[in-house]
Image: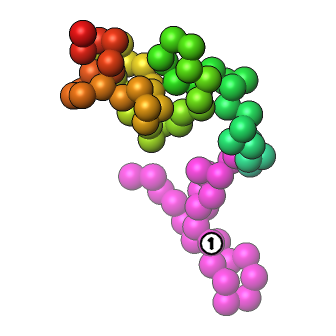
Amino acid sequence: MLDLKEVVVEENKQEVIGDEWWEEGYKVKSESNPSDNTDTGDLCGHPGCEKTVSAFDFRCYTCRGRFCPQHVGPNINCQLCSD
């Protein structure tokens, strides 16, 4: 099917052609500082709240906004969408 063949690279060491195709062009990004989330817009969706949120915080089912623990709603919706 793919017609891959083993090639002897060094003595007693074998490598499959195409073995590292998934690493091609891969670049390691530097870790961002969690306090820099305000630059990416990762703030609580409640008007006037300046707390940062992440992908693990509450997400409203209706408006899809992310909310800090203080502004989560009583159910799957945020406080504003629950009214």
Q: Residue furthest bottom?
A: 12
**Left or right, residue 4 beside residue 70:** right
> In the picture shown, does residue 71 fall above or below 34?
above
**Left or right, residue 72 beside residue 17:** left
**Left or right, residue 31 beside residue 22:** right
- Give the x, y percent position of residue 36: 74, 34
Nearest the camera: 35 or 69?
69
For badge 1, the amino acid type reads: Glu
Nearest the camera: 23 or 74?
74
- Give the x, y percent position of residue 21: 61, 51
Residue 68 visible, this orientation: yes
| Range covered by the magenta-colored residues | 1-27
Q: Residues within 10 Å of mark 1 (few under 14, many from 20)?
A: few
Quarter location, residue 50: top right
Q: Which residue is mark 1?
A: 15
Residue 29 visible, this orientation: no
- Residue at 68 percent across and 77 percent down: it is 8
- Residue at 65 percent across and 52 percent down: it is 23
State yes or no: residue 16 in magenta.
yes
- Give the x, y percent position of residue 80: 34, 12
> In the picture shown, does residue 27 fall above or below 15?
above
